[in-house]
Amino acid sequence: GPIEVIVTGHSKGGAIAPALALWLKETRTSRAGDPGWDAAGQSVVGCVTFAGPTPGNRAFASRVDRELGSAHQRIANTNDVVTHAWEMRQLRQIAFLFEQRSAPLERLLAVVAAATSHLDYQHASTGVLAFAGATQSARSFVEELIHVAKDIGIEPLVLSLILAPLATELP
């Protein structure tokens, strides 16, 4: 039967995984004298990322959407600063994630956004599962950064994503 390859990554690995998935998909069959790694072209390549940004500009995001389509899943906590990098609109939202605790970052983020806006960074738009992880107003900004990924209860979410397809295959 066909080979199913799912590339996964968390945080920085979540940024790299779509690039690797695209490369695997584009090199699987023969072209220009290269036999590829799946000469029969029966393989399926997908990508599931956790808590990471998508690498690249608008053209790259469109390529991820077009080439991977529904085989691309990006799981993002909207209260995690990493998932906001580097798209301009989302980058500026970081200053407002944790009320007044993150407000001092507003000027810095405006400078960063202005300096990087010409890169036209954009997240892929297909397969995005966004949710707001729990925050606690009693925590400092630094404590929120440390705890936001730990407190979101990602384990049940990950298990449901992994086990749901298996449940349909089991008797």
Image (spheres, rainbow, N blue to C red):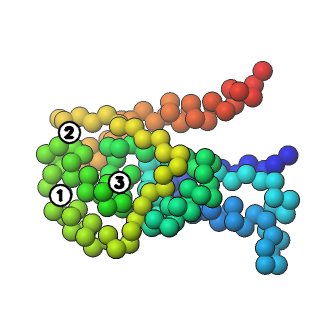
Give 116 or 81, whichever is nearer the viewer: 116
Which amino acid lies under the numbered mark 1 shown in the image of this protein? Glu
**Residue hosting label 1:** 106
Identity of the residue drawn at 15% across and 62% down: 107
- Residue 162 visible to the viewer: yes
Name the front one of labels 2 and 1: 1
2 or 1: tag closer to the N-terminus: 1
Q: Residues within 10 Å of mark 1 (few under 14, many from 20)?
A: some
The CA span between labels 2 and 1 is 19 Å
> Viewed as shown, does residue 107 lie left or right of 12?
left
Secondary element at tag 3 = helix
**Residue hosting label 2:** 139
Identity of the residue drawn at 23% across and 62% down: 109
Q: Tell me if residue 44 comes above or below residue 112 in the rendering.
A: above
Identity of the residue drawn at 78% across and 50% down: 3
3 or 2: tag closer to the N-terminus: 3
Residue 165 image point, x, y percent: 67, 33
- Residue 7 visible to the viewer: no
3 or 1: tag closer to the N-terminus: 3
